[in-house]
Image (tube, helix red, strand yellow):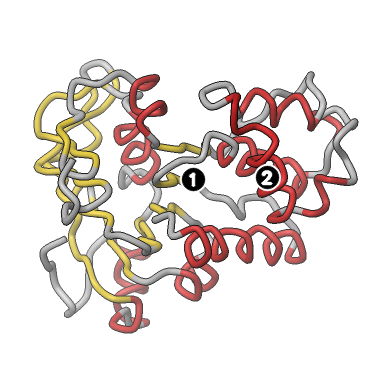
């Protein structure tokens, strides 16, 4: 491990599913203590980026590193054990189990720390403390999303990959989820790679933005440098405005 290295770095990564290539020589770096927001039109490769970081796609080229250590050949379970936490948009809780048992499942990599980890995640999501005996499949959409993040946090990850955490949630639930994500970054200093469809909320939370176009990082910039023209170009014609590409 290299102390000064980015928590997660992708260098010229090409990846996809079977013969289908989605990411095309993609390079980016997640920096310490930051939320890096991934924006792009549908089909630009945002979710595939997270799956590739987790080791869930076919890698055809490039290199991935975790805090400077080459993890390119590591399977998903080894990446999880090394501290990569991944919360997919769907299929992210054990619907037939109680909230309490979901949290126990999240701690299977670190059972000795289960009690402390559970207290910490219930502090993030107090609503779950009231629902410990409830079956996960019976929770509201907002509660399920809270639980999906909480059970991932039970493993005490070093970085977090979040795919569309606000999807299909009511505004009040989005407020609670985004407040928890901000606390994860600020209080626990866990960097977050965030794919989010609610652009305004994502920009309000993030430190930097990477704009993906056809499987590549077309531009990387601080949140404050993103213009309405960039967003218009991105979502209407799949290009990036005058800000142009920059190094991750």
The circle on residue 145 is: 2
Asked whether 11 or 244 is in front, the reply is 11
Q: Residue at label 1?
A: 163
Q: Is residue 129 left or right of residue 218?
A: right
Give the residue displayed 26% in from the left and 16% down from the top: 18
Q: Is residue 73 left or right of residue 202?
A: left
Q: In this view, does 196 lie to the left or right of 212?
A: right
Instruction: Choose top left, top right, bottom left or bottom right for residue 154.
Output: top right
Q: In this view, does 70 lie above or below 187?
A: above
**Outermost residue, front side:** 112
The x and y percentages for residue 64 are 18, 36
Instruction: Choose top left, top right, bottom left or bottom right for residue 78.
Output: top left
The x and y percentages for residue 170 are 75, 59
The x and y percentages for residue 129 are 84, 45
The x and y percentages for residue 5 are 17, 52
The circle on residue 54 is: none
Give the residue displayed 31% in from the left and 26% down from the top: 55
């Amino acid at each position: 491990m290299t102390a000064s290295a980015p928590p997660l770095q992708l260098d010229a990564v090409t990846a996809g599913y079977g013969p289908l290539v989605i990411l095309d020589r993609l390079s980016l770096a997640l920096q310490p203590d930051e939320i890096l927001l991934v924006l792009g039109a549908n089909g630009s490769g945002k979710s595939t980026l997270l799956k590739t970081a987790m080791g869930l796609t076919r890698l055809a080229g490039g290199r991935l590193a975790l805090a400077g250590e080459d993890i390119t050949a590591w399977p998903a379970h080894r990446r999880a054990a090394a501290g990569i936490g991944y919360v997919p948009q769907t299929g992210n809780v054990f619907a037939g189990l109680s909230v309490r048992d979901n949290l126990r499942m999240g701690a299977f990599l670190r059972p000795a720390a289960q009690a402390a980890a559970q207290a910490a995640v219930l502090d993030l999501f107090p609503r779950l403390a009231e629902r410990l005996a409830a079956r996960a499949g019976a929770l509201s959409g907002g509660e399920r999303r809270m639980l999906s993040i909480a059970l991932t946090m039970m493993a005490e990850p070093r970085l977090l990959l979040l795919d569309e955490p606000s999807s299909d949630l009511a505004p009040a639930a989005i407020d609670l989820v985004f407040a928890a994500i901000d606390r994860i970054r600020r209080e626990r200093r866990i960097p977050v790679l965030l794919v989010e469809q609610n652009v305004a909320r994502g920009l309000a939370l993030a430190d930097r933005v990477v704009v993906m176009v056809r499987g590549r990082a077309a531009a990387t910039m601080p949140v404050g440098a993103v213009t309405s023209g960039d967003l218009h170009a991105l979502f209407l014609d799949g290009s990036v405005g005058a800000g142009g590409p920059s190094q991750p």
